[in-house]
Image: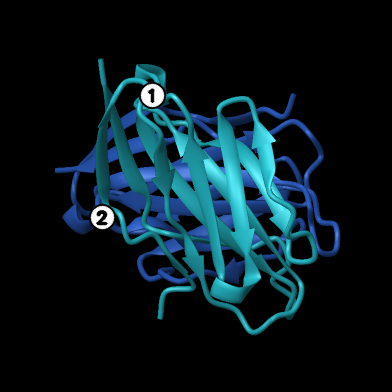
Chain colours: A blue, B cyan
Amino acid sequence: DVKVTQSSRYLVKRTGEKVFLECVQDMDHENMFWYRQDPGLGLRLIYFSYDVKMKEKGDIPEGYSVSREKKERFSLILESASTNQTSMYLCASSLATRLSNQPQHFGDGTRLSIL
Amino acid sequence: AQKVTQAQTEISVVEKEDVTLDCVYETRDTTYYLFWYKQPPSGELVFLIRRNSFDEQNEISGRYSWNFQKSTSSFNFTITASQVVDSAVYFCALEEERGSTLGRLYFGRGTQLTVWP
């Protein structure tokens, strides 16, 4: 079974802090994704990556950056946390096959509160 | 514009009732994939099903069934004889063929299903 592990289930940080959310997958997947989930808005894509050191912006990249130094790890960085970044953050991974019929596999999520 | 629309924000049913969750999608691609995910109160998204655009055959898996209709761009999900454990948020998602963004999913906003005992 694919395992996507997010470093924290719950995290509380202060405004202005630099925040790192870590995600590790154990199935050698090429693709990795970061979403945020807010009530009534569903899942919105922040950033994704198709390979090591490669990243692409999703729909809401402002205020975030990412790092993919190793294939299995994809980090989301809040450069200077703000209260409007309080949310549930979900990491996912998938195989990079053309017309993928492989689903994205999700971690358990990190509920981040910015005070 | 939303590529995936789940018009039902919340649905409440009583146990043993049948319930259908609607999903309408929009794409210009001729080849694409559709997905349903379940998110129980614990938070993790659980993959339920994927269908490709060339296969309009309906699918049944136990109490779950899916009705894919290209003519109406819909991929509806029915739970028969619902149970309390079916209570969750259900997401419909679309993966398109185009460009370099293979593997990217577009999610609907989700439908919160509550099944009362």
Looking at the image, which is closer to me, B62 or B38? Answer: B62
**How many discs appear?**
2
Looking at the rendered structure, which numbered label has been put on residue A40?
2
Looking at the image, which is closer to me, A53 or B36? Answer: B36
Q: Give coordinates of residue A114: x percent, y percent.
A: 21, 45
Q: Give coordinates of residue A32: x percent, y percent.
A: 65, 51
Disc 2: which chain?
Answer: A
Answer with left or right where residue B81 lies relative to residue B103.
Answer: left
Report, in whole angstroms, how far the alpha carbon at label 2 lies from the one at label 1: 18 Å
- Residue type, mark 2 in image: Gly
Q: Residue at x 36, y 57 (%)?
A: B109
Residue B15 appears in view: yes
User: Which residue is farthest bottom?
Assistant: B28
Q: Give coordinates of residue A27: x percent, y percent.
A: 79, 34
Q: Secondary structure at mark 2?
A: loop
- Residue type, mark 1 in image: Ser
Looking at the image, which is closer to me, B101 or B17? Answer: B17
Q: Quadrant of residue A43?
A: bottom left
Q: Is residue B38 above or below residue B68?
A: above
| Callout 2–callout 1 Cβ contact below 8 Å | no
Q: Residues within 10 Å of mark 1 (few under 14, many from 20)?
A: few
Residue on which disc 1 sits: B42
Judge if badges 2 and 1 mark residues of a common chain. Answer: no
Disc 1: which chain?
Answer: B
Q: Is residue B66 above or below residue A100?
A: above
Q: Residue at x 37, y 21 (%)?
A: B16
Answer with left or right where residue A3 lies relative to residue B45.
Answer: right
Q: Residue at x 43, y 68 (%)?
A: A61
